[in-house]
Amino acid sequence: MKIIIFYASYGGGHLNAAKSIESYINKNYKNLDVELIDCMKYVNPALEKISTAAYIEMTKKMPWAWGKIYKDSQKGPLAHISSKSNQILAIKLLKLLRDKNPDLIISTHPFGSQMSSYLKRKGKITAKIATIMTDFSSHDQWLIGHEYTDYFFVAHEQMKSYLINKNISETKIHATGIPISDRFLINYDRKEILKEFDLKENLKTILFFGGGEFGLGKTRTVEIFENLVRNIENIQIIAISGRNEKMQKHFNEVIERNNKQNFVKVLDYTNKVPELMSISDLVVTKPGGLTTSESLASNLPMVIINPIPGQEEENAKLLEENKIAIWLKKEDNPKEIFENIFNNPEKLQSMSQNACKLAKKHSTENICKIILNDPFWDISKKDHI
C-alpha cells in the first residue's frame, strides 16, 4: 500500500503534523510505503519560495494584511482565485501522482487537499483522500472539493459541527485533535529533567517561547519577557529563542540587566519540548495549532502573545472561551496578568483542568487507526506490528 503525505512550508505546524503521522505508521505498520512531499515545492518551486517568503514577511511586518487575506480567502473573489490557481497547479501534481500511484493521500495543508480533490473530481486519480486540519478554527479553503475527500480530521467538536453545517457528511468527520508526537505520551521523571536543565525543584516554572526563527512581534515579546523577569518572584523561566539569534541576544541582555542568571535559562533550538512541557506550570506562546495541541496534551495553562491575525487569533479566542488561556493584548499590563495567575493557585489549577478537557493526547494514533482500520483497505493483521 502506497501513502503520500502532503504538507506545505507555510509555518512549521503542517510539516510536524505530517511527520507525526509518518512516524506512527512506520512504527506500527509494515508493508506500507509512506512518503512525505511538500506539495507546493513540487508543483512550482519558484512560487513556493516567493509565497513562503511573502507569508513570513507579511506576518512579521504587516500582520493586519495577512489577517485581511485570511478573512477574504474564506469566500468571494480571492477564494475563487485561490481555488482556480490550485486547479492549474494540480496538473503538475498529476505527474507525481501517476508516477507514485498512491492508494491514500493524506494532506496537512489545504492546498494539497484542493489539488488532490480536483484531480479526483476529474477522474485523473482514484486514491482515497484524508484532510487533517491543523488549526483550532475552520477555514473554508480546507473544504474545497470536500465531495471527493474521504476523511476530515479536526481539532474539536465545534469544528466538526461547523463542517456538518457546511453539508459535509458526519461520517467523514472525526474530532481527533491535531497530530502530535507520541513523546507527549511519555511519563517523564521530573527530577531528572530539572537536573538536566539545572532548574530548581521548589519553584514554579514558565516555558516561554520567543517567536522562533522569524521573530514575530519581537519588540512586544522582549517587553513581556523583561516584565516577567523583573517583576515576578519565586518562579524560574525556560526561554526558547529557537534559531532566532537576535531574540536570543535580547533575552540574554534582559537576564544580565536584571541579574537573574540563576532563575532564567535561555535555549536556542531544542528537541526537548515534550520534556520541558512536562515540568512546566505555564506556557507563554503564540497560539499556533501545533504548539497549542502540545500544550493541551501537557495540561498546561497558556498566556498567549502576538497571535497572527487570522487563524492564530481564532485559536486564541477559542482558548480564552474555554478558560485555558489568557490573551495578553497590547493594552494589557503583563505584570498584572502574571501576578493574577501566580497569586491564585486555584486559577492555575482550573486552567490546567480545562486544558485537560480539550486535550487530544492520542490524536495521531486515532487518526491512523480510523484511516487504516477502514474495511476498505483490508489491511491484514500481518501488516500491523
Image: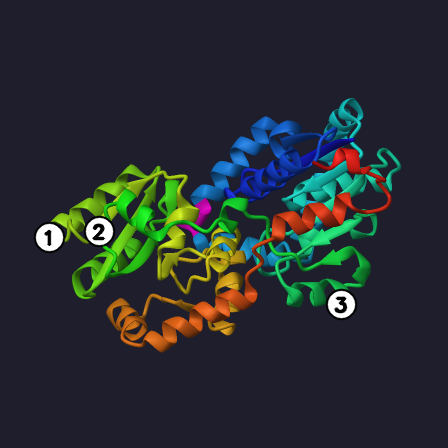
Q: CA distance from mark 3 to mark 2?
A: 48 Å
Mark 3 is surrounded, within 10 Å at the Cα level, by few (under 14), some (14 to 19) or many (20 or more) other residues, namely few
The answer to whether the residues at label 3 and label 2 have Cβ atoms under 8 Å apart is no
Q: Is residue 215 left or right of residue 96?
A: left
Q: What residue span does the magenta drawing correspond to?
A: 58-62
Amino acid type, callout 1: Asn
Q: Is residue 151 left or right of residue 192?
A: right
Q: Which mark is residue 165?
A: 3
Q: Is residue 99 visible?
A: yes
Q: Is residue 4 magenta?
A: no
Q: Quadrant of residue 157?
A: bottom right
Mark 1 is surrounded, within 10 Å at the Cα level, by few (under 14), some (14 to 19) or many (20 or more) other residues, namely few
- Say which element carries label 1: loop
Q: Residue at x 50, y 52 (%)?
A: 66
Q: Is residue 65 left or right of residue 215?
A: right
x and y, in percent, of residue 345 in the image: 33, 74
- Say which element carries label 2: strand
Q: Is residue 247 visible?
A: no
Q: Quadrant of residue 248?
A: top left
x and y, in percent, of residue 92 in the image: 73, 28
Amino acid type, callout 2: Val
Give 36 or 199, whichever is nearer the viewer: 199
Question: Main SS type for the magenta part?
Answer: helix
| Residue under label 2 | 264
Mark 2 is surrounded, within 10 Å at the Cα level, by few (under 14), some (14 to 19) or many (20 or more) other residues, namely many
x and y, in percent, of residue 318 in the image: 53, 67
x and y, in percent, of residue 71 in the image: 58, 59
The answer to whether the residues at label 1 and label 3 have Cβ atoms under 8 Å apart is no
Q: Quadrant of the C terminus?
A: top right
- Say which element carries label 3: helix
Amino acid type, callout 3: Asn
| Residue under label 1 | 259
